[in-house]
Amino acid sequence: KGAKITEKTMFSIGSISKMFTTAAVMMLVQEGKLSLDEPIVKKLPMFKMPDARYKNITVRMLLNHSSGLPGNCFKGKYTNARNRNHLKEEIEYAAQSRLKDQPGKFSVYCNDGFSLAELLVEVVSGQSYSSFIYEKILEPLGMEHTDFPIHEIMDGKYIKAKSPFDLDFPQEYVNGIGSGGIYSTAADLCHFLDALREGRLVDEAGLTEMNRDQQPKELVVADNTTERYGLGWDCVSMRLFEGFGKQALCKSGSTFGFNSHSLIIPDCQLSAAVVLCTDKGSASKLNQALVYEILKAQGCAFEATPLPALKTVVHPVEITGLYGNKDQIVRARFEHGDLTLEIREAQGGWRPEVSGLQEDHGWFAGQPGTSVFGMADLKIGFVPQGDELYLVYQMPGSVVSEQAERQVFLQKLKPSGKVSGWKNLTDKTWIMDNEYLQQRTLGNVPMTFTVQMEKGYDDLLLAPYPLRILNDYEAVPAIEIPGNYSREMSSVLWLADGSIQNGQYHYVLSENLPSLDVREMTLRDPLIHWYIGAAPIDTLKIDGVARVVVLDENGQVEFDSQLSSCLPASLRGKRIGFFGELNSKISLQYLEENA
C-alpha cells in the first residue's frame, strides 16, 4: 500500500542486511585490517560486559552466531523514526548483560552480533557503515535501488507495510542497519548475490570460509537442517537442493510487515531473491519453489536423500518432564504407553497440544494428518547430547519435495530442588513502564508477564522463558538450544524496590493501578504511566509527541495511538498507558460528559 509496485520499488529486506555486513567484514579481513579469530575487544575497547567471558568473543563468532550474546538489543532498534543512538545503546546494553552461552560453543541466532560487526566496520574503516557499503558495494555494482534508514525515503520509492491495526505503518527504521536495516529490491539483491558468488567482492579464501558449516561437528544435536550457519548465511547446505546434488546457501529476513529470502547455488551460477510486503506469505517457500522448478526445467535430476540417523531415547522415565524454549514450556507425559504433550498457558495451567503419539523406530508420531506445534505429520524424537535431552522434530518434506527437514525445538528442564524467595512473586503480574516512544510496535516484547513456578522445579521460573534462579535477586536463562529456539533471552533481576528488570525492559507490579479519571495530563518523565480504564473516552487529544496504549485482559495491545484511529468502545478494567516527550499534553473527554 502507498506505492505502485515496480521492479524499482524498495522493500525492507530485514536480516538479509547481514550478508552486506559479512561482505564488509570479509573485505576488511582481505585488506589485513581484521582477523576472523581475533577478539573483538582489540578493536572495540568500549565493549565490556560484567561476564568476563566476553573477552573471548571473536570476529568470527559475531558472523556465525556463536558469540553467546543475549540476542537482540530490541528497545529503540525497530522504530518509526530514526534513532541515531542505537549502536551506543547496544554497548550500554552489553555493559549490563550476562552472556547466555559460552562463546564459540554453538550457534544461536543473534542480531546483536551483527550490530557489533556493523560497529567494527565503522571503527576499522573510519567510515560510517552506510558510506562503506555504498562505496565498496552499491556504487561499484550499480545498485541504484538500495538504501539505508538514515533519512526519510521519498514516498513512492518504497512500499509501506500494513500494521496490525487500521493505519499503515510509516517508514520503517531498523537502526541496527548491519543486522536488519537495509532497503532493496529483488533485482538489486541478485546483483549483490551474483557479485558475492563470483568472487567480485570477497576472494576465494574468504568465500570458502563464509560458505562452510560453522557448527562444531561433535555437537550432533545441532544439525538443524534449516540452520547450518556459515558466516552470514542461515544455511550453507539447504536440504531441498541436496536432492539435486547441489550446495545451496540462503539468508532470509523479516521485519514488521516484510519478509524476504535470498539464495545462491554456485555450481549453477544462480542467484535468486524474493521480497514480500506481508507477514502472512513465506518468501522462503516461494523462493525455494521457484528455484526448484528452474532446476527441473534445466533437466537436473532430483532424488530425495535420507537424513542422518540420530540416537534417540524412548523410555518414559527418561522423557517425562518439562521442556522449554524461548517461547513456551511443554510438559511431556505418557498415558497407556502413548506420548502426550501439553503447553503451559500464559497465566498458568496446561493446555493439551497432542496425545496418542506412538513410538516407531525411536520416533513418536500420531495418525496421518495429526498436528503438533501447528505442523502436520511431525515426528518427535528425544535426542541426548552430553547431560542434556532435546526434543527434536522432523518435518516430512519441504515445499515441493519429500526432502525431510529437522529442527531442535525444546530442551528438557532439570530441577535442582533448591527453593528461593522468588516463590513469593508467583501469581503476580508485572507491567512494562519504559518502552521506547517511537518503537515500531508495542507488545512485541511482552508488555506484561507473570512469574510462574511448577511444583518440583522450585529453582526455575517458567516465564517469560525458562530461567534458573541464581540467588535472591537474579535468574538466568536455563536453556541452550542450537539454532533459533533459545535466541533473544536475557537475565531477569528482582530489584530492591520490588520491580523487575528483564534485559532492557523494566516492569512494575500492576496491582492497585489508579482508575483513569484525569482529564488532562502533562508528561514530566519518559515512563509509561498506567491506569485502569472505566468510562469510555470520547475524545483523545495529544499536544506534542506522545503515545497511548490500551491492553486487553490478556495483556495484548488492543489500541496504539500511532497505528489506530479508534479507541475501543469499552475500556472498563483494561490497562491504559500514556507516555511521550517531556511536557507533551494529553487531554481526555469521557463519553458521559457529552450525554
Image (cartoon, rainbow, N blue to C red):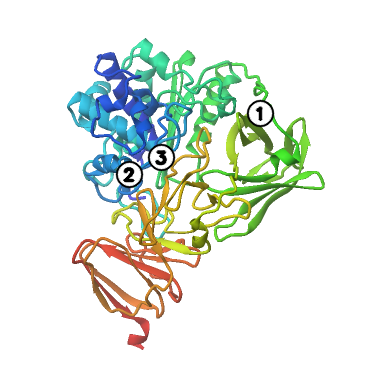
| Left or right, residue 15 beside residue 226 | left
186 and 397: which one is in front?
A: 397
Q: Is residue 474 above or below residue 549?
A: above
* Quadrant of res 10: top left
Residue at image position (54%, 52%) is 462
| Left or right, residue 464 beside residue 1 | right
Q: Quadrant of the C terminus?
A: bottom left
- Cβ–Cβ under 8 Å for marks 1 and 2: no
Report, in whole angstroms, how far the alpha carbon at label 1 lies from the one at label 2. 47 Å
Q: Is residue 9 above or below residue 464?
A: above
Q: Which residue is mark 3?
A: 70
Report, in whole angstroms, how far the alpha carbon at label 3 lies from the one at label 2. 11 Å
Q: Which residue is mark 1?
A: 402
Q: Amino acid at mark 1?
A: Glu
Label whose residue precedes the other's in the sequence (3 or 2)? 3
Q: Residue 170's spot in the image, x, y percent? A: 31, 52
Q: Residue 100's spot in the image, x, y percent? A: 44, 38
Would you call the spot at circle 2 few (<14 residues within 10 Å), some (14-19), or many (20 or more)? some
Q: Which residue is mark 2?
A: 96
Point out the frontmost of discs 3 and 2: 2
